Amino acid sequence: MLSLNQRVPSYLKAIAPYQPGKPIADIARAYGFQEDQVVKLASNENPLGMSPKGREAMLKAAGDLGRYPDGNGFGLKQALARRFGLSTQTITLGNGSNDILELVAHAFLAPGKESLMSDHSFAVYALASQAVGATLVSVPAQSHDLGHDLDGFAQRISDNTAVVWVANPNNPTGSFIPGARLESFIAGLPASVLVVLDEAYTEYLSEDETYPAFEWVQRYPNLLVSRSFSKAYGLAGLRVGYGVASAEVTDLLNRVRQPFNVNSLALAAAEASIFDDDFLARSAELNRQGMQQIQQGLQGLGIGWLRSWGNFLLIDLQAAHPTVPGAGVRVYEALLSKGVITRPVANYGLPGYLRVSIGTKNENEAFLKAMPFALESLMTLRAHAS
Ligand SMILES: Cc1ncc(COP(=O)(O)O)c(C=O)c1O
């Protein structure tokens, strides 16, 4: 008889589990810090926390947790429809936008089908594809920004391609595809290929960089736009995101969705946050200033980075330290010992890079203060190696 393990499909066993940013409590325990001495710049969270309006609505909803949430998310869908001029028939709510990505995989992928992603792009595209037995095709990145090579994507489309994942801005590279280029790519795809345009960081774009993705959904029935409340809206811990697509695609996603996939607190907080323009503007401005602060600090240390359109920066340790293998993990570990959590990205095929999320002024300062020590550890290694 087959053992339990033998019954599990080999494509499931081949999955490398997602590696999240380390929690503050873990590092405090491991290195003997108080939790408030640890700075976490590892998961592209909002350093301002959540919107005050969202918090107020969430606390109110906390009074009635004995009941199931509204499984259709009526209030939040209405709010999104009003905010962006959408029909509620085109909105799917998710337990984080991660959930939307998984719903897409369940509805559109299966063994024998392929999905395409860029070499250095969000890990969940691979996980969601592999979990349903689909074949993941990784398209080599552009060399200048490590971002999506859309011509390369177009060349890899085959009869088996069912889903194309495009993150804009992209995580972890921070790269950005201008709207006009993106639209011509979508327009050129076969109508049988679903494009997932993942806009988790779109709220950080300046006005002249934004493009009308929701209008494109009306023009291209094979386009799904996913968005998150975890980043600029500061609701990462509540888990809420949404997808916008044709009514037909939305209906398919609804069939594979858990009946109550978004909890009551998340629904209430998101519904109130979506109209908190003041909080959104403050978040974007803090990000702009912090980005500048970190770049100036890195410049002073002779370290380069890739231009980023998100709330994080991909630091290039390789250029200054080409002889140290796995420089990203080494600098990450040295920073941990100083109570600063960043994100190594070797699992994204980028062992010579380190991703740092933009924090408050003080958090960014703590990171920059610890960096000379962390870089010193690379020097020591180099001296030993030579
Ligand atoms: C590009 C991208 N998409 C989606 C997500 C998922 O975010 P969430 O599930 O919190 O909405 C992330 C999170 O880091 C991301 O970087």
Image (cartoon, rainbow, N blue to C red):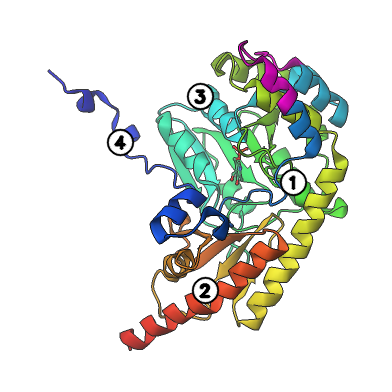
Residue 205 seen anywhere in this rendered image of the structure: no
Taking the magenta stretch, the answer to whether it contains residue 69 is: yes
Q: Which mark is residue 202?
A: 1
* Vertical arrangement, residue 253 with respect to residue 56, above or below: above
The residue located at (68%, 13%) in the rendering is: 70
Instruction: Tell which residue pokes out farthest to the top in this image.
Output: 67
The residue located at (85%, 31%) in the rendering is: 84
> Label 4 amino acid?
Lys
Residue 194 occupies quadrant? top right
Residue 121 at x, y = what percent? Answer: 55, 50
> Label 1 amino acid?
Thr
Of the two numbered discs 4 and 2 in the rendering, the one whose residue sits closer to the viewer: 2
| Inter-mark Cα distance, 2 to 3 | 38 Å
Mark 2, residue position:
317
| Inter-mark Cα distance, 1 to 4 | 34 Å
Per the image, label 3 sits on a secondary structure element best described as helix
User: In the image, which residues are magenta?
Assistant: 59-74
Q: Which mark is residue 13?
A: 4
* Vertical arrangement, residue 105 with respect to residue 43, above or below: above
Of the two numbered discs 1 and 3 in the rendering, the one whose residue sits closer to the viewer: 1
The residue located at (67%, 76%) in the rendering is: 297
